[in-house]
Amino acid sequence: MRLWIPAIIVAVAAANIIRLQTMPELDALAKAFWSLLSALGAVPFLLIWWLFLSRLRWRARLVGAVVAVICVVGLGSLVRVDGSLGTGWPIIVWSWTARKTGDVPGSTPASAASAGAALEGEIDYPGYLGAARSGAVEGIGLERDWGAHPPQQLWRHPVGLGWSGFAVSAGLAITQEQRGPNEMVICYALESGLALWGHTNEVRFSDAMGGDGPRATPTIADSRVYALGATGILDCLAADTGRTIWTHDILKENSIPIMPFGKTASPLRVDDLVVVTGGAVTRCTLLAYRCADGAVAWQTGGDQASFTSPSIATLGGQRQILSVNAANVCGYDPKDGRELWHYAWGSDKWPKCAQPIALDGDRILLSASFQNPTTLLRVTRAADGEFSVGEIWKNQNLKAAYNNIVTRNGCAFGLDDGILVCLDLATGERKWKDGRYGKGQVLLADDLLLIQTEPGPVTLVEASPAGFHEIASIPALHAKTWNTPALAGQYLLIRNDQEAACYKLPQRKAGAVSLKP
């Protein structure tokens, strides 16, 4: 049978998988992708050996091939893929395992009349990664000893599917959920968790690896909510009642094909505009609508959109929209969408999800995955007003994938393939790497890192270049969690695609911030 042939095929595939898994420059997602490709790539060679080189009788060869096909088909009927881990490996479950619908029994939002939560709150966290989209909150003064002063759970309840986070303003906590066939924007009372109102769109985005439901986080500004669904529906709603003010199906209206994992970028409110990203086409990279009536203000860009959210930065003395696109990073004038500068970064074949960080000195920190290098740029503006971009450094010391990075005192902190890393921003050198948290999310609260781990617990770590020091942890959630947490004052809101919870974190200083009644 010349068994040495399949032995060599299997050995080569196994050796290549081992090589890939031990390459430090590859992130976990790339390792999983190429390893799976290597394993699948061995199959046709084994089939060729069996049919043409095994020296068996033709009847035996054909019977063996038929049995193999029956086994594959049978296995396919017994199991199915139910999403994936943060490492990229699929989650395999029995085919009869109940599918997640997102239905939340007994949680009908209260009537609009009862949604009269006061809009005069003193704290907020008005959208994705906070007001500046930096993931940093200052002046909270969190207590470090959670053993002596444990966080207080205010509420916990089931929620619909999706990877949206919470936006918080004036005592309202707003997120997006998939409940059965309906994609919804749901408003909860911050301190009680009572569902106050819900806005419904009859659409459902499904993805075998990423899961079903909305991905973006709503944005709250001037008592309005701007929410972008996974299929591209942009809604402007009244924050107190959920009443629709205007709506657009941005992809359908502009004949833009949807991206592989749906719309993930959160709306950006800038001046009198709300700005969103486009889709899988090299035009309409950004689209701007008038807040007042939803009228189209401008469209710009010549690259496909990425999975990051646009943000506001001042670079070269000019305020601009900073946007990571599929194959480049650009700055745009908020007034008319004019491109001010661009920098080619990585390939458009692989996703870019981590937010760019604007730093002092007109610098921008970029990170992604799939061998897109972590890069520190400097944007300069000449006397004639023209912009230019230069690299300060780039390396593979922090592969953020779809986990965001925070910065403090000249250092960057983020999860490199699930392990916490501290980088020196001046040089890009790694100061330390420790603590395994999976594909979670990181917030900065003064001098502390608040880490929502992928398995569910929330952990407190010192944001110090001196070394890794985990201070405290609570078993906040109990399943895969990719959603970004929200920290409004001492109120921590967390969720995944099954449940949500609100914790009141202890503070060191007297006179803790609270909501008005």
Image: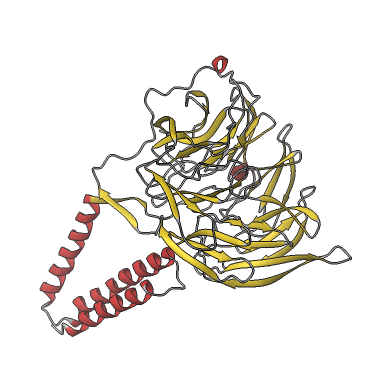
The image position of residue 349, as x and y in percent, is 53, 65
Depth order, front residue of 77/196? 196
Residue 98 sits in which quadrant?
A: top left
Identify the residue at horizontal 37%, vertical 25% (top origin): 105
Colouring used for the render: secondary structure
Rendering coords of residue 80 (x, y %): 28, 51
Name the side, left or right, on which 440 lies relative to 408. Answer: left
User: Is 216 left, or right, of 269 in this rendering?
Assistant: left
- Residue at x-position 49% and y-position 66%: 432
Residue visible at 76% across and 51% down?
Answer: 337
From what the image shows, is residue 364 above or below residue 298? Answer: below
Quadrant containing the N terminus in the rendered view:
bottom left
Please state which of residues 136 and 204 is positioned toward the viewer in this rendering: 136
Q: Position of residue 442 (x, y in %)?
A: 51, 51
Q: Is residue 173 above or below residue 413?
A: above
Q: Is residue 512 visible?
A: yes
Q: Residue at x 30, y 76 (%)?
A: 13
